[in-house]
Amino acid sequence: MAASIARVLRAWEETWLSPTTLPARERLARSGWEPDEADSYCDRCGATLGAYEGDEFGCASCRDRRVPWARFVRLGAFDEPLDEWVRSIKFGRDRAMGRALGRMLGESLQHAGATDGLDGGCVLVPVPMHWRRRVSRGIEHARVLARSASAVTGVPTECVLRKSSRETQRGRSLEARKRNIKGAMRARGRIGEAQRVVLIDDVATSGETLREGVRALRARFGQDLEVWIGVVAVTAEPSRRRAIEVGQGGQGVDEMVVGG
């Protein structure tokens, strides 16, 4: 009898309530989605790899350009359903989903060896928001992700970056992103004896926000500081996205980017 009532209630819930009312863990389980395997994306820039595309020097997106970080770790590409979940965190104050994806990111960082072989330790540093934007949105998504990743890895979170007020990066060209974010961050406080910092954010688009974070960290803590990147999702360059999807039997799809 109790089981029958439970089935009726669940059917009613699924029919009349938004799916976002389901617990984050249940949404993840029902979707069947899993984080990417490490060999499916470039560990230098985070781009999705095509067949035989990556090597020790990177991939087509980054092989001919310098990146300021040592390693890039992601959960997946900015596609369904991950893009919807990211937006629910960033714009819908979905802390439960933020915690769930943060734990997954922590596991991926562990598998990548982010905390291995360091006598002086490691810290997680979330990409900051300006306080006005934080108040208006009611959530600081990168901090939620970092603290949940910290709970998995045992690596402390240090919120040492601050950001000045700038216009959103959303919808800007690459050059406009560079101009908009330049000089926007500074670091203060301490990271103890940490030899490695993992910079945490939700989405990487052009990478300019991450580059600015690395610049600010090294300006404060030394140019020899080793920095890794840990993000939930990476958007594809339109040309690469079309090529990868056509190669997999799909078709190119326009994307909406939300990250830096």
Image: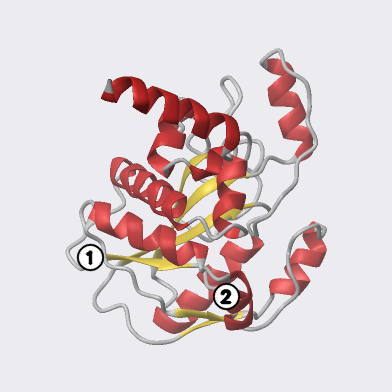
- Closer to the observer: label 2 or label 1? 2
Residue 142 spot, x, y in % from top left? 48, 63
As drawn, which residue projects farthest toward the left? 119
Q: Residue at x 65, y 44 (%)?
A: 235
In the image, residue 229 sits, relative to residue 113, either above or below, namely below
- What kind of colouring is applied to the model shown? secondary structure
In the image, residue 124 sits, relative to residue 43, either above or below, namely below
**Where's the N terminus, which quadrant?**
top left
Cα distance in 3D space between marks 2 and 1: 29 Å
Q: Which residue is mark 2?
A: 134
Tell me which amino acid carries mark 2: Arg
Tell me which amino acid carries mark 1: Gly
Q: Earlier in the sequence, mark 2 or mark 1?
A: 1
Q: Is residue 129 left or right of residue 256?
A: left
Q: Nearer the viewer, residue 162 or 89?
A: 89
Q: Which residue is mark 1?
A: 121
Q: Quadrant of residue 147?
A: bottom left
Q: Quadrant of residue 197?
A: bottom left
How many other residues sit within 10 Å of disc 1, few (<14), some (14-19) or many (≥20)? some
Residue 97 spot, x, y in % from top left? 45, 49
Q: How many numbered discs sit on the rendered protein?
A: 2
How many other residues sit within 10 Å of disc 2, few (<14), some (14-19) or many (≥20)? few
Q: Residue at x 34, y 20 (%)?
A: 4
Residue 50 spot, x, y in % from top left? 61, 24
Q: What is the secondary structure assignment of the residue under circle 1?
A: loop
Q: What is the secondary structure assignment of the residue under circle 2?
A: helix
Q: Residue at x 44, y 35 (%)?
A: 28
Residue 86 spot, x, y in % from top left? 57, 49
In the image, residue 142 sits, relative to residue 9, either above or below, namely below
Would residue 54 be visible to someone looking at this image? Answer: no
